[in-house]
Amino acid sequence: MVKFLKMLSISVREGTATRKYPFESPLVTPEFRGKIEVDPVKCVGCGACTRICPPKALTLSYENNEATLKYFVGRCIFCGMCAYVCPQKAITISKEFELATWELEDLYDETTHTTVKCRICGKPFTTVKFANEIRRRIENKVPEDLLNVCPECRKKLATRKIGSRVVGVSGE
């Protein structure tokens, strides 16, 4: 009984320690990390966010002539690494935390981009926006014909070029 009275006096003196959510606004600090938001205008589809995401909540898939960046909120751990690594600053961390839903589809967000096909094998390998961003950044330092070639075909071209140099040198 003495412990109860002691606790009662402390609680009366200190006041309420919890908020009556949803009737009172929640305590959301500036450091709080909620659901991420992808700006489809800024996003170029480079896939940097998909490579850094620890739980693989972000995925980039290529189907038909489209590259789709999918974000599954149900898998996200709200670490913010994707926003940190995004070179275009297309990902922002919101304060949104009320994510409960009855429908699984509500937990998915998608951003779709058109793709560039390899001029040799015809396989889609990057997005048009990302290819244009690379062109802008390198400013004609790489031959244009190499920019429209997928990594596998580029590797084969480089191997053939190196091989022809070696054969040419040893044949003299």
Image (cartoon, grey):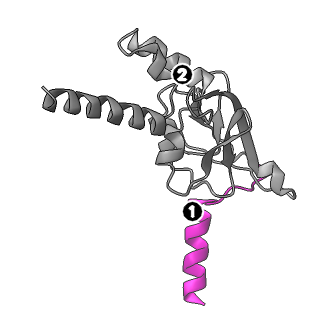
- Quadrant of the snapshot with the C terminus: top left
| Kind of residue sitting beneath label 2 | Ala
Residue 92: image location, x then y, percent: 58, 33
Q: In front of the other: label 1 or label 2?
A: 2
Helix, strand or loop at mark 2: helix
As drawn, the residue found furthest toward the top would be: 140
Give yes or no for residue 114 being in the magenta stretch: no
As drawn, the residue found furthest toward the bottom would be: 1
- Quadrant of the snapshot with the N terminus: bottom right
N-term mark: 1 or 2: 1
Residue 91: image location, x then y, percent: 58, 33
* Residue at image mark 2: 131
- Magenta residues span 1-24
Residue 103: image location, x then y, percent: 86, 56
Q: In this view, does 162 lie above or below 9?
A: above
Does residue 8 show up?
A: yes
- Considering depth in this image, is 44 or 20 the residue closer to the camera? 44
- Considering depth in this image, is 25 or 142 the residue closer to the camera? 142
Q: Residue at x 53, y 23 (%)?
A: 148
Q: Which residue is drawn at 54% across and 78% down?
A: 6
Does residue 23 show up?
A: no
Helix, strand or loop at mark 1: helix
Horizontal side of 103 relative to 100 (left or right) equals right
Q: In this view, does 147 lie above or below 167?
A: above
Residue 160: image location, x then y, percent: 35, 33
Q: Which residue is drawn at 40% across and 31% down?
A: 157
Q: In this view, does 169 lie above or below 69?
A: above
* Residue at image mark 1: 13
Q: Give the distance between the C-alpha atoms of the residues marked 1 and 2, in whole angstroms.
A: 64 Å
- Considering depth in this image, is 159 or 71 the residue closer to the camera? 159
